[in-house]
Each structure stands twice: as C-alpha cells, then as structure tokens.
Amino acid sequence: MTITTLREIGADHERRDGPAKVTGTAPYAAEHPFADAVYGHPVQASVARGLITSIDTVAAASVAGVLTVLTHENAERLASADDRELWVLQSPDVSFRGQFVALVVADSPEAAREAAELVGIGYDEYEHDVVLRADHPEFYTPEQVNPSFPADTQQGDPGAALTTAAVSVDATYTTPAYHNNPMEPHTTVARWDPATGHLTLHDSTQSVHQVRDTLAPLFGLATGQVSVIAPHVGGGFGSKGPPHAHDVLACLAARAVPGRDVKLPLTRQMLFSVAGYRTPTIQRVQLGAQADGTLVAITHDVWEQTSRIKEFAEQTAVSTRMMYASPTRRTTHRLVALDVPVPSWMRAPGENPGMYAGECAMDELAIAVGMDPVELRIRNEPRTDPETGRPFSSRNLVACLRAGADRFGWASRDHVPSPKPGPDGLLRGTGVAASTYPVNRMPGSEAVIEVLPDGRFAVRIGAVDIGTGTWTALAQVAADALAVSLDHIELQIGDTSLPHASVAGGSSGITTWGTAVWEAARALISTHGHLPAAGAGATGRAGANDAQQRYAMHAFGAQFVAVEVDQDTGEIRVPRSLGIFAAGRIVNPRTARSQFLGGMTMGLSTALWEHSTIDPVTGHYVNHDLAEYHIATCADIRGLEVGWIEEDDPHVNPMGTKGIGEIGIVGTAAAVANAVHNATGVRIRDLPITADKLLDAGL
Amino acid sequence: MKPFDFKRSTDAARAITLVAERPGAAFLGGGTNLVDHMKLGIAAPGLLVDVTRLPFDAVEELDGGSVRIGATVRNSVLSAHPLIRERYPVLSQALVAGASGQLRNLATTAGNLLQRTRCLYFTDRTTPCNKRTPGSGCSALDGHSRELGILGVSRSCIATHPSDMAVAMAALDAVVRVQGPGGTREIPIGELYRLPGATPERDTTLAHGELITAVDMPRVSGRSAYRKVRDRASYAFALVSVAAVLRIEDGTIADVCLALGGVAPKPWRAKQAEARLRGGPATEEAFLAAADAELERATPTTNNAFKVPLARNTIVATLRDLAAGADR
C-alpha cells in the first residue's frame, strides 16, 4: 500500500529546525546545559605499531585541576574484546598511530590539554607498514564486503570475451584515503550516576540506539541503563554511524568520576586517527565491446586496505554488478590489513570510489569506440538487474541522461579532445558520468503516534537528524500518513527514550523511519478512526520489504560537468555542473536540493582536492586540519544545478522514496575527470586531479 | 595549553620593554597564527603583549611619494586602501589572494610578515622538525613535501614562507621599520628574512624585543600584478606565486622586479631573472630564458619537482600578461 494523499509530501517546507540553528540555540552534543561539567583530553600513540612499556603520569596529575589520568593500567576492564576498535585502554598494544593511550580528566579543558601533553609514554616501537600498494604480498579475500555482499562475483568468461572484443579498455585507477570531516567534530558527553546505575550520553551520532546497544554490553549494563541523546548533529557522512573509540573513552572517564558530566570533544586533528575514514583503493577496470559499443565484458578488480584490529571491507565494485548489461562480468575485492587507523563508513561507501573508476572507464571506452558517452551508456542499459535477473522496481538512468544532456547543451560537445586554449589561456571541456545508489531499508525501526490533548499528534521515533532535514521531512511523511497538515505534527527524535530506530545512514532514513511512521498512522486510524481522541496511540514497525525479493531497487542519476584548465599552471576550475536524479518521490524539494547539492559538492572535492596523506615514516595522516585537507570553498562552487525526474515507484515503500543522502556524491569525480580529459587530452587516473599531475603528464 | 600572562599597551616603548625584559614573551597582533600555535602546543609564550592598539594603524603618503603602512593596519583595510590599489595593484592583489575574508579582517601588516611556515610537520608537535625543535631532524625530507620549498632550502629545512603580501612587498623593494630596546632601524625586506642553513629555527633577523612599526613602500613606475597558483580557488596557500612589476619603454624592458612565493623560506626575489630581462626584449623567449636562469638553482624533492615547471610557466604567464597590458 502506498500513501494516496500527497499534500505535505512534495511541499517546499523550510526546515523546522532552521530558526534554532541559525540563531545558535539548537544544542549540539557539547552545548547542552551541563552543571558541573569536567573535561577530557586524550593522549594518542606516537608510534604506528608497538608496545607501551612505561607510563609516567606524575607531571600530568600534578597540573592544577586534574581529576584523573586514565591509562590501560588503571582503566575499568571492559566486558568484551570482540570489537578491538572499542577495546580502549585495555592493553599496552599500539596498532596504529594516534590510537588512544591515555585520557586526562580535569575541571577545565585547558588543564586537561596541558596535562595530556605531560603524560610520558614509553614504547617498544616495531616496524610498521602503512602504505597500500598493488604488489603487497598479504592481500586476502574477505568473507564478504559491506554490508553483506560476496567479495567476488563472476558471470561467464570475461577473459575470453575481452580477447575477442572489437574494442577494449584496460585501465587502473586509484583513489586516496578520505576523512569524513563533518563540521561538528565527534563529541561525547558522558555521565555515570552510581545511585541509579544509569549512564547518560549526549553524543554526536547518526544513531542513538546503535550507540546505546553497542556500549551497554561493553560496560556490563542492560540497554535500559544507558540513555543516548542527540537532537542535533553537525554532519556525520557515515563517520558517526557506529560508535568509535572516543565514545568508550568518555564512558570510561564518566565511570571514573561518577556524578559528573565528562565532556570529550575531539579536535579536528584527532578525527584523522580515531573516527573512521574511507580506504584508499586501487582499481583495475577492463571493458570489452563490439564496434557499436555494446558491452561484451566487464571486469572490476579492487585492492584496498583495512586495519589490523578490525576488518572493514569497502564494497567498491558492487555497483558494477548491476550498472550495465554485459554477457560476461567479474568483480573482485582484495584487502590487506595495515598498521593504520580503522576505516569505516563514508558517504556512498563503495559507490563513490567504485563509480569513479567505472564511469571513467566508460568514458575511455566511448572514446575508443568513437561515440557519444551518453549514447554508450544508453546502449548498454540493462532490461533487468544483470546480477539477479530481477526487474528494476524503477530505473530511469536513461531519462536522467537525456534530460541532463538536453539541459546542459550536450549536443554541441566535441567528443574528441582537441585542446585549444581560448583567448584567456583556458582549455575548456565537458564530461558526463552516471550516478547510482541502492534503496536501503534498515531493520529495527518502530514509531509511536499519540494524539495530544490539543489535537496535534506526537510522532516518536529515535531517529537522528544529522543536518539532512529529517526534522522536517519525516514530519511531512507523518502529516500525509495521518491526512493532517504539517502544523499538526510534533515530531520527537534523537533520544533512546523514544522507540528504537535504525541509523541515519545508507540513505535509509526516510525510507525506514517513514515506513514505521506510516505503519503507526495506519494502525492509529484503523483502530481509532480518522478523528482519534486525545490520548489515543498506536505503534508501527518498518518490517522487511517483501518486494525486495522480486525487484532490484536503486536510484540513478546523471552528472554533467564543465571544466576550465589553465594551460600555464594546470589549475582546474569548474564553472558549471548539473545533476539530474531519479530517486523516487522527493519529500521536500528544498532539503532534497540541499542533499543533492551537498553530495555533488563533496564529489567535486573528491575529484579535485580531497586526499588524506599518510606519512610512511611516522605512519600518520599529516594533512590533518581543514587548512591542509582541502575541500571545496565557496569560491570553487560557481554554477551548480540540480534537477530530478518525477518517479512513481510503488514497490519501494509507502512513500515511494528511494533515499537521496548519498547519490549526489556518486559519479561527480568521474564526470570531472572525463571533462578534464575532454579539455586537455590528458587522462589522469589517480585522484585527486591536481595541477602537478597535469603538468607531469605533459599538459 | 599553558597559562600565560597577557598585557596590552598603547605605547610602543612600553610594549618593547615588556617583551624585551622577558625571554619567551611575544608580541600579539591579529593572533591568526600565534594563537593557533599556542593551541597546537608549538608555541608557549609566557607573556603576550597585545600591540594592536599602538598608534600604527595608518596608511599615509610621505614626502617624495612613498607610502608608509602602519604595522597594525589590518590586511583587509590595506587591500582596499585607495593609495594601495592605485599605486601598488600587485600588493592589493596579493592581500586579497591570501587567507580568507575573516582572517584578513584580523591579520595585521607586521603579523603577516612574521607568520610562520605552514609545513605540516612544523605544525605537528608529534613529529621531528628542526625549525620547531632544533636538532630533531626534518620529517619533510623523507615525508610529504609537495607544498614545500625548492629555492634557498637546506638539508635542515625545506619550509616555505606562507605570506602572499610579503611576496608583493619584496617585489616592490619595501623597507621594514623596526623599533627595539636599542633604538630604531630600517631593514630592506629582503634582509628581514634569513635562509635556514643549519639554523632554521630563526625565520628573521629581528632580535628579541624588536617590533615592526611600519613598512615603507617606495615609488614605483610600471605595471604590476600578482599571480597565485593554488589547488582550490580560495583559502589555500600558494603552490607558486609571482609578484611582478614591469616597465617597458620602446619595446625594451626598462625595469622589472620579480618575486616568487610558495617556493622558498622567504619571499624569493628573482634577481637572476631580473638581470636577464633588464634592457632586453619583452618576448616569450626572453621571459622563458629568465625564468630558467632563476630556477637553475632549484633543489626540489621528488614530491615538489613540479614546482620548477610551474614556477617557470607562472613567471612567463605573469610577464606575458603585464607586457600585453592585460589585467587578470
């Protein structure tokens, strides 16, 4: 069943939390009114691999205001060592540079920081290995890649097909490590009340329930003994999905100084070691085609890293399994565990690096075949999901490509790069790439709706708004589900006292939570009618979607980019980019537009600037602040346009939504890379594409 | 962050005495660099003396047509000042190419000159760095050095000076006025900075307690321009920058002043290139030969070898534009 009344869904509502945010009154994790707070400052390992042999806390403990210095020698023992990322201050082993080795708690942040610098740690330092390289001898095949895909797939014999293909491309692309860098650094404020046996966290997280459900057993507590509160979160991009080591550290500190709120805001620099990042990748893509561009073989082989203490297998080649039709296909993922920080989720995990490589290879094939890259993609549009054979619940990649090409003025493009500078010395070119992202529905979400005395509806679910617009869009869903106007909805989210909710991740929020809210509304109406009395209530659950067994469900898009390259300096600027998406029903065009724009902006950064540079000698990410870790500035964003195809998909969920948080970042980097090639004739296959690489390649 | 004393003075002599008397004391201008360093634990002055209220906040024309820029004039004010925009476009352009609007509103003239390198290792106290901790070694030599220097560097240190403003001032033969416990002196900007050699911990020739009070800009004739090459369009330090003043008479280069940024421990006055160009033709070939002459002595790392062709191209492009009368 689907919602039939669409009054609020699709309406251009301003953010309901907007006024509080722009006036600075929306509290983020560190900003709640805490009486009598104390402050934590961590000490991080200065070796990439080794053993702590001595700890001297005398000088640190003597700093005025210091309450305690926690180390592996005196910290509380955790109940489980299953997740070694969270096994904080439990052992003298150092597994990556920047790992937490101590925490100072003091009555001021200044004292905590000063004392942290005085903690003396002695190490036995071992040789370390922090550089991903294609010829590493220790690559292995993971049991599965995230979240639960097979590491390798094969259909037919792509090797044989490649040898007989009329045209082929064989190219290796690399992407560097990336750090999520949300605006609000990860912050946890923890308080342990021994009298009530309750642990309270104000956390900057994408999932209050996941934090609670993960941390409670570590401390031998029942989930009912832990509360997690996150009304507003300043971005996460995946890095605030699961709890990380600092969450545990804050709880250890809270239990060591009972009755006090321990504030642990990480610095920007710390995020580069302890809060997740995207693995660097090495990707080889081979495409074989007939002379008319029809694909006969696709292979996508991926090499990437994980950490020694915890496996994280980015699903880089997974989108290649369903993107284009081909009678033969192979995808593989190989991992190597290095002495590096623990990689984790980052916006469009898998799709972002994987589609960069795949969509660049498609551009290379279009040039090899001698056809319009838009038409090449259309020629290889599959009728059903190439991997499962199931029909797509809806698939409008072709419509996106056509609409985008029309609006962008693609018809006049010269598909053969012929670099000729304009009178201003700038080389100009354009590029295209496809975007995609799966429709994800997470298990375990529940919503409760209760009629308030004033006739409005309290809608309760432990969802989190990480800046995406959930406060507004989920209320719009509730309004239409109840057939009332938006001002009748009082949404309550961001607290574990509310019904259990899944993570604000995988672009699954509205799809999952909206389904639970819709089910609750349906239950309320079926039990109490359309005019329920005050106090009436009902519960709804977002169960599994049976249609997912019958249909392949994905969102698609097409991105078009124009670049200018300075012939003298190799500087690349992007005067225009356009993204057209087919992502199901758009709940709120205003916040949706921001999601697409934000994704494309981040994708532009992927293309041209973003990279985390690891120092092979010290083993740490050296460009660990926003002055040196470059992302787009306002001056870099000139023309950025977003549009979407109206898509009515009855199979995905009652709202017809597909999720829009991530698709915007997918494909942008390839479109830029393809545009740079079109402008210069130079193909850079290593991100980011920078002036030095263009000059080295003979621009 | 260690506790520190803080004093504010409206009298230069008093401020100088306060700092001179106390080892480890420091003058505080806009604080956009020093306060960061205090947070990062790489500077720990026991006393800060705020000098932003000293009477050095004017831009004024002197007899003879030169212009005096007060030490506490904010970068945003200076970049927009009519005297600067009209007479020293290269300086105005360099200022607005630097940092961000918010930083320029705070940063002072003297503070800009005295800002320290943004070498990643210098700003990270957990790594060896000869500039920060003499004798500890240079992490950049075998580490990440893409942004670092190719001219005037040593085996001890390959850091670059990060200022844009100072590069323009170097091309304009600015003179730095200094007041110290022993009196006042004038330092040509080229002599304000020192090369690292074996002692990279000292960036300048200033003694402890010496305070920059003003920068004097001599008259110039000729067109001038600043060209900054950077990865992104704003809020990025120069990979390479070029400040150029060019005067062409009867098709011949009557005078030229060239300074490079992003390539050396100091604003790099390209004397070799200038000597090649003076009195010669203003042609692409001449520009190229001059750039090559200057860059002959470059000692890049593998990471930053691209800066040699990039600097060459940027010198040529800047001179080409100036010669053509084109503004960009």
Image (spheres, coloured by chain):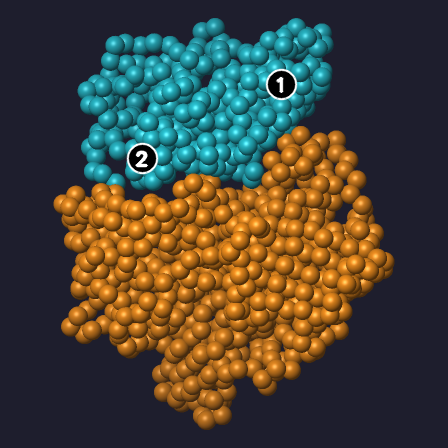
* In the image: residue A169, left or right of residue A242: right
Residue pictured at 30% horizontal, 60% vertical = A88
Asked if residue A154 shows in the view, the reply is yes
Colour of the chain lettered B: cyan
Quadrant in which residue A155 is drawn: bottom right
Quadrant in which residue A321 is drawn: bottom right
* In the image: residue A428, left or right of residue A607: right
* Letter of the chain shown orange in the rendering: A
Asked if residue B213 shows in the view, the reply is no
Chain hosting mark 2: B
Tell me residue A218's x, y (percent).
30, 69
**Residue placed under numbered mark 2 in the picture:** B42
**Residue placed under numbered mark 1 in the picture:** B291
Chain hosting mark 1: B
How many numbered circles are shown? 2
User: What label does residue B121 carry, if any?
Assistant: none
Question: Which quadrant of the figure contains the N terminus of chain A?
Answer: bottom right
Task: Inspect the image, locate mark 1, and give the three-letter code of the amino acid beneath it.
Answer: Ala
Q: Disc 1 to disc 2, how far (Cα)?
A: 37 Å
Residue pictured at 28% horizontal, 70% vertical = A79
Q: In this view, does B12 lie above or below A173?
A: above
Residue pictured at 46% horizontal, 42% vertical = A616
Task: Inspect the image, locate mark 2, and give the three-letter code of the amino acid beneath it.
Answer: Ile
Tell me residue A547's x, y (percent).
61, 82
